[in-house]
Amino acid sequence: MKVRLVLLVLMAYCFTAEAQYSPGPSDSSSVWWKNTTIYQIYPRSFADSNNDGIGDLRGIINKLDYINGLGFETIWVSPFYDSPQADFGYDISNYCAIAPEYGTLATVDSLIAETHKRGMKIVFDLVLNHTSDQHPWFKESASSKTNPKADWYVWRDGRGKNGKRPPNNWYNVISQKGWTYSKARGQWYYSAFLNFQPDLNYRNPDVKAAMFNVVKHWLGSGVDGIRLDIFNCIMEDSLLRDNPKVLTYVPSAQHLKTKFQNRTNNINHPDNFALARELRDTIDKFTNPTRFMVGEAVGSVNDNMPLVGKYGDGLNLVFLFDMIFYDFKPKFFRDKINLYEQLCPEPLMPTIVFGNHDNRRSINRIKNNLQKARLLTMFQLTARGVPVIYYGEEIGMRDVWMPKKDAKDPISGMMKAVPQFMRKKLPVPLNRDVCRTPMQWDTTTNAGFSKSMPWLPIDSEAGIRNVQTQLADSLSLLNTYRDLVHLRDSVTTLKCGNIIINNVGKKRKVLSYLRQYKDSEYYVFMNFSKQKVELPNEVRVLFSTIYTLNKGDNFTNDIITLTPYGGIVLKYLGPKGQSDDLDYKGQ
Ligand code: NOJ
């Protein structure tokens, strides 16, 4: 009886929610990149075609049918350009050449062509903020104070006697000293990340022109979008003034304060937006199809959205990293939806990111529980925002721990100097190898990644968490992704409709929202608890992670029960029930 009462309240709320939203015009349905789904590939770890233990571009080409079969439209490939690989490609020594272990320019051309042949899009990862210290530009720049490239990087005299103290107090993104002394030049250079990644000086028009040419070069080769590495660090204060002092010591992914300073002069500088605008003008000249940029930026949504601009005329998208640090509670997701709606309303579009190559695997936060992961997948693919999925997330790949002495990540070595209490607070984990282990394809040797010893170890649970095994199981996490990506793809409302929270009675257990576009409405209910929750009826099931409910089931009088950690996408039957939803290719 009590349950029925709750049900009535739930229904009442659902239908009053309808009266609260204002449909408003939405122009997003015609902009492809606002409606896309992005699958991130870390090339070193995805698929090894020549069996040298390292993934490569041919390996990616061989797996395009897999990604296409899952329904993802866009692939983003982490850097594969010429590089000493000190930071596995995020230290580039030639932006227009390819690292031999990954392939050749011809392989890149065929990767682009093969992606397009499948009706998919491809995003390249460009590190505009810095080069490798092995880049010929830097070598020249570091050789003297008077060479033609002397002003291509951020150089300054040091302070104090003989200039032996850094030019200012800046700490970089990972809370390390931002300046490195160069004996040859007798000056200091600044780096926002690691000291072998010197920052380019964008106040020099020649630098800007050279890097914009790189962007044009790749867009001219047919690339559909670019991911911009730490774009919020691209400009620094022109006078290189000290950062203001604050009382906070411990850093956080949510603010820029660290070690008693607020890094306002070297991170999230207001001049970043003007550069974003200029880049936007450049990329908007490439049409058929239009191209897009997605920026990586550390900090809060408040800090990052200015890169897109109030009118969406800067970067097209920025990664919003809040979900990476999720709490498995409806309130967390409700709050984020509200925040994103406030800060990224039409025509802006948020992104929904649960992981990437710099963070612990997302499933770690729910103790590797695959059923809970299916619920998160439902959120990621039915909420408003471009979903960005990190390879292996779709099969529930876990963090793989390895002895410290075997760590390949350059950050790992440096962290010895970081006190224990600060380590967890840094925006990147101690050893990023844990989330970069080889993709688990099947149950053969090395999980089908390579016939040779892979560059990083394979997870001991690869026997269950692999593509082959999960494809054969209709209730697997992989099939949940596949089904939901296809559902999203076939329902305009799920891609670009409004999102309105249902503030139903079971707030602590259930996350529920309405997606609405023109005359079409969809409800999503997710049970975050281990108890059953009952739902209103007169609905058609479009997707469910509950094994007793099937796609296409219509309910008119019965009660639907959400099993523990069960989730469901529903369409209400009735006058607004025109159907564009049952033809999707999922199971
Ligand atoms: C952010 C990238 O995601 C990370 O992997 C890299 O180490 C730094 N930027 C430096 O490029």
Image (cartoon, helix red, strand yellow):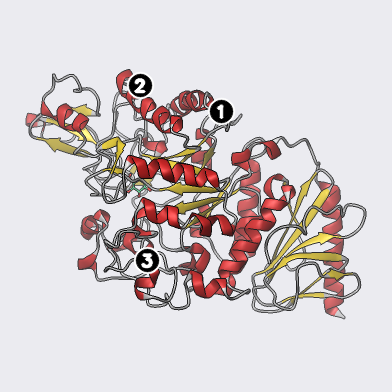
Q: Is residue 246 visible?
A: no
Residue 287's tag is 1
Q: CA distance from mark 3 to mark 2?
A: 40 Å
Instruction: Give the residue at x 69% y 45%.
Output: 496
Relative image position of residue 90 (x, y in whole percent): 31, 45
- Going from N to C along the chain, the mark reached first, 3 or 2, is 2
The 10 Å Cα crowd at callout 3, few under 14, some 14 to 19, many 20 or more, is many
Residue 462 vertical position relative to residue 32 in the rendered view, above or below: below
Residue 449's tag is 3
Relative image position of residue 344 (x, y in whole percent): 62, 40
Instruction: Give the residue at x 40% y 44%.
Output: 256
**Amino acid bearing label 3:** Phe
The 10 Å Cα crowd at callout 1, few under 14, some 14 to 19, many 20 or more, is few
Q: Quadrant of residue 474?
A: bottom right
Could you tell me which quadrant the C terminus lies in? bottom right
Could you tell me which quadrant the N terminus lies in? bottom right
Q: Which residue is tagged 2? A: 209
SS category of the residue bearing label 2: helix
Q: Quadrant of residue 330?
A: bottom right
The 10 Å Cα crowd at callout 2, few under 14, some 14 to 19, many 20 or more, is few
